[in-house]
Amino acid sequence: MATYKKRGAKKTQYPKGSQATESRTEEVFSNLDTGASRLEQWIAAYQRQIFGLIFGIILVVLGYLGYQSLILNPKIAEANTEIFQAQDFFEKGLADDEFRDSLFQNALSGANGKYGFLDIIDNYGGTPAANLATYSSGMIYLHLGEFELAIDFLEDFNSSDPLLAPLALGGIGDAFAELDQLSDALNYYEKALSFSNNQITYPRYLRKAGLVALSLGDKKTAKAYFTIIKDDFSSGVDAKHIDALLGQASI
């Protein structure tokens, strides 16, 4: 498991280079698309659909498990009911720029007498709802800029789902990138790529892995990832400025 710097730790220092090198590095980071505000367009486009789809599948599983086990049924059913309010706050936060932070806080801590994701985790540990709440909490902390907490929660999330699992791994990569731990970020982006080559997450993390590799000076790796985007995903949003990025990786 990779480790991250504690709060207040000194940020990574890089060797001084030429003005052109510094400018190129700044350009790479400007394209990295890891911060909260820079994630919002992609999240708004895909995250709600992904979350709704997976949540629906989980409900079916929950129903089956409840039917099969009289011992677990009350706990699972209760957790399933309690998570709906937190999920509602989370989805509203994804769609509301003005009140996003407060809605995310309500999703985490609860409101109106209802549990938040943190309560679900504390009170219903071991249930699918608690596991899903762990993922959601990690993503919220990522959007709020609490990168260490994002890593903690997303590393605790356990899933083999071809969409949620790479999103969690990529989220850890984003958090490490924001903490200037670029080698760790690249490692997790590559884990996300290895987990699934679906059409939603795969081109996204190809781009991120390529950008981080480029900033680390690994132009060969960066070029390989950018080339896949150009060849296989040229019509997608992640192919934006791909020729320019390939040019940087080929210098």
Image: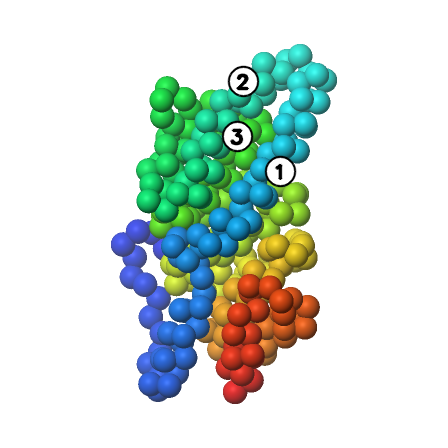
Residue at coordinates 44% horizontally, 52% vertically from top-left? 40
Where residue 58 sits, quadrant-wise, is top right
Horizontal side, residue 185 vs residue 104: left or right: right
Q: CA distance from mark 2 to mark 3?
A: 11 Å
Horizontal side, residue 217 vs residue 22: left or right: right
Residue at coordinates 53% horizontally, 21% vertically from top-left? 81
The dot on residue 130 is 3
The amino acid type of the residue labelled 2 equals Glu
Residue that numbered label 1 is attached to:
54
Nearer to the camera, 156 or 163: 163
Q: CA distance from mark 1 to mark 3?
A: 14 Å
The image shows residue 139, relative to residue 180, as above or below, that is: above
Question: Circle 3: is it few (<14), some (14-19), or many (20+) Cα within 10 Å?
Answer: many
Residue at coordinates 38% horizontally, 38% vertically from top-left? 104
Pair 1/3: label in front: 1
Residue that numbered label 2 is attached to:
78
Tag 3, which secondary structure? helix
Which badge, 2 or 1, comes first in the chain's sequence?
1
Tag 1, which secondary structure? helix
Which badge, 1 or 3, comes first in the chain's sequence?
1
The amino acid type of the residue labelled 3 equals Ala
Q: Position of residue 115 (x, y in %)?
A: 42, 24
Note whether residue 205 is visible. no
